[in-house]
Amino acid sequence: MAGLLDGHVAAVTGGGSGIGQGICQAYAREGARVIVLDIDSAGARETVGLIAAAGGKASAMTLDVTDRRACNAIAVEVASSGSISILVNNAGINRRNPITADKAAVAKDWDDIMSINLDGMFNVTHAFLDQLRATKGRIVNIGSIQSFVHVTWPNSAAYTTSKHGVLGFTRSLAAELGKDGVRVNAIGPGMIETKINAEARTRNPEMVATVMRHTPLGRPGKPEDVAGPAVFLASDLAAYVTGSIVMADGGFRSI
Ligand SMILES: NC(=O)c1ccc[n+]([C@@H]2O[C@H](COP(=O)([O-])OP(=O)(O)OC[C@H]3O[C@@H](n4cnc5c(N)ncnc54)[C@H](O)[C@@H]3O)[C@@H](O)[C@H]2O)c1
């Protein structure tokens, strides 16, 4: 049976863990050749191994999305074996120091979160822009419920700001690149069980309970819960969808 992404080449940042790994696996299952980009080389190789074991096509490249020059170099290297037609900007971090915490720590959180979650998204998108325009490609940015709200637990001003920025970037690129046939959308995950929040979930079960009380589906998500919308947005099923954010949050934002 034909896959929804047959013939596509997809680059996924942060593809070595969690949501990014789930998206890489789903894209490969749907027929795409996947380029797994991650600062964590071992994680990226693990994803390639999982895809190869399932009969899919993937390769791993080590990339720090904050390094603009490296992003440009990787885009050139990738182009030598075929332009990408799908880009997923997924690499991201979160830290939860209150804004009133130690000044140096709060300033470092701000700098690190902005440089990975926002500058990183710009660096990679800009580096691959010519390829995506040439292939009438699709961009999927990973936002959050925090693209809209400061969630019920405090202490994430930098992360909330960065994820609002992801949505702004998505909408402005959709407006600008529509004429080139490039679609740009976002996904807003709720609480998904990955490494990014493993420690917080263990340390603070009350935080999980608070989020679950506000989640109609009543359970945390798994990476595959985000991978489905990511396949949809990258595929021709979403041919008339751009500038949108699809929530994968168990209903958190709708109530
Ligand atoms: N898990 C959640 O509850 C949740 C909710 C909303 C949004 N998100 C977003 O989903 C995305 C993926 O997060 P996750 O939950 O899978 O976390 P994760 O920690 O499991 O994965 C993040 C990946 O990004 C990579 N990464 C970090 N810094 C990088 C850099 N400078 N360059 C390249 N790669 C880098 C990490 O090595 C890791 O493989 C993030 O943007 C996160 O903000 C997660």
Image (tube, rainbow, N blue to C red):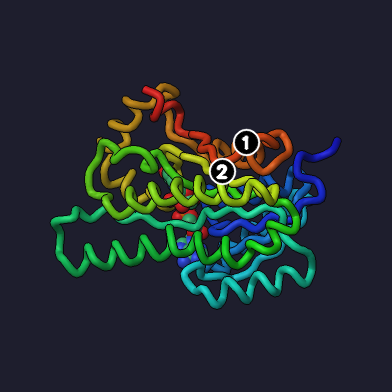
- The three-letter amino acid code for the residue at tag 2 is Asn
Seen at 45% across and 56% down, the residue is: 92
For residue 253, above or below residue 179: above
In the displayed structure image, the side of residue 45 where residue 209 appears, left or right: left
Q: What is the quadrant of the C terminus in the image?
A: top left
- The three-letter amino acid code for the residue at tag 1 is Val
Q: Which mark is residue 241?
A: 1
Q: Which residue is mark 2?
A: 185
Rendered location of residue 75, percent (x, y) = 66, 69
In the displayed structure image, the side of residue 21 where residue 199 appears, left or right: left
**Residue 194 visible to the viewer:** no
Q: Secondary structure at mark 1?
A: loop
Q: Which mark is residue 224?
A: none
**Residue 11 visible to the viewer:** yes
Q: How many marks?
A: 2
Rendered location of residue 201, percent (x, y) = 33, 44
Seen at 80% across and 46% down, the residue is: 6
Q: Is mark 2 within 8 Å of ligand 1?
A: no
Rendered location of residue 115, percent (x, y) = 40, 65
Q: Do the residues under discs 2 and 1 have CB atoms within 8 angstroms? A: yes
For residue 33, above or below residue 148: below
Q: Residues within 10 Å of mark 1 (few under 14, many from 20)?
A: some
3D distance between C-alphas at marks 2 and 1: 8 Å
For residue 92, above or below residue 71: above
Q: Quadrant of residue 229?
A: top right
Q: Quadrant of residue 78?
A: bottom right
Q: Nearer the viewer, residue 186 or 53?
A: 186
Rendered location of residue 228, percent (x, y) = 62, 36
Seen at 25% across and 40% down, the residue is: 153
Seen at 69% across and 73% down, the residue is: 76
Q: Secondary structure at mark 2?
A: strand
